[in-house]
């Protein structure tokens, strides 16, 4: 599965606005892999090609979060800033039953 081009244009605009690289720790996933690595099972946000996890922490995580919120591009933002493997999840999924948007959560 490949990420959706219009979603990646939003990520590129975010990268330009932040002014630093945005390493990807997870992007588009096939349903089988998503089920193996996520509680969202075979139909989670990453299976849509419209979700990404960016490996940022500390000051860069703050900047990504700030710019992402100001952009209005993203409807789902997840934050994991504890321990190893820190990241920020971003998606632009629509508001549907069982997955209300916009929303913010922590891991």
Image: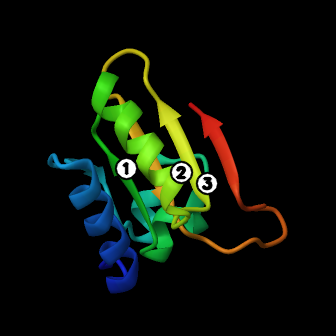
Q: Is residue 88 above or below residue 73?
A: above
Please, what secondary structure does the residue beneath circle 2 have? Answer: helix
Q: Is residue 55 above or below residue 31?
A: above
**Sequence order check, earlier mark of 3 and 1:** 3
Please name the residue shown 19% across and 47% down the image. 23
Q: How is the image coloured?
A: rainbow
Please name the residue shown 37% across and 71% down the image. 10
Q: Is residue 7 above or below residue 103?
A: below
Please name the residue shown 40% across and 31% down the image. 62
Which residue position holds label 2? 69
**Sequence order check, earlier mark of 3 and 2:** 3
Which residue position holds label 1? 53
Please, what secondary structure does the residue beneath circle 1 have? Answer: strand
Q: Kindly identify which numbered label has been placed on residue 85.
A: none
**Sequence order check, earlier mark of 1 and 2:** 1
Q: Kindly identify which numbered label has been placed on residue 40.
A: 3
Q: Nearer the viewer, residue 63 or 29?
A: 63
Q: Report the residue that reaches farthest toward the top.
A: 83
Quadrant where the C terminus is found in the figure: top right
- Quadrant position of residue 60: top left
Task: Compute the Cα span from label 3 to label 2.
Answer: 23 Å
Mark 3 touching mark 2, by CB under 8 A? no
- Quadrant position of residue 74: bottom right
Can residue 57 be seen here?
A: no
Q: Nearer the viewer, residue 28 or 94?
A: 94
| Closer to viewer: mark 3 or mark 1 | 1
- Quadrant position of residue 81: top left
């Amino acid at each position: 599965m490949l990420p959706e081009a219009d979603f990646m244009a939003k990520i590129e605009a975010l990268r330009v606005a932040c002014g630093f690289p945005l390493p990807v720790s997870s992007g588009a996933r096939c349903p089988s892999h998503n089920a193996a690595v996520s509680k969202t099972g075979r139909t989670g946000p990453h299976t849509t090609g419209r979700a990404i996890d960016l490996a940022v922490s500390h000051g860069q995580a703050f900047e990504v979060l700030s710019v992402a919120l100001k952009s209005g591009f993203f409807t789902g933002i997840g934050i994991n800033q504890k321990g190893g493997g820190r990241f920020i999840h971003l998606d632009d999924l629509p508001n549907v039953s069982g997955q209300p948007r916009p929303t913010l959560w922590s891991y």
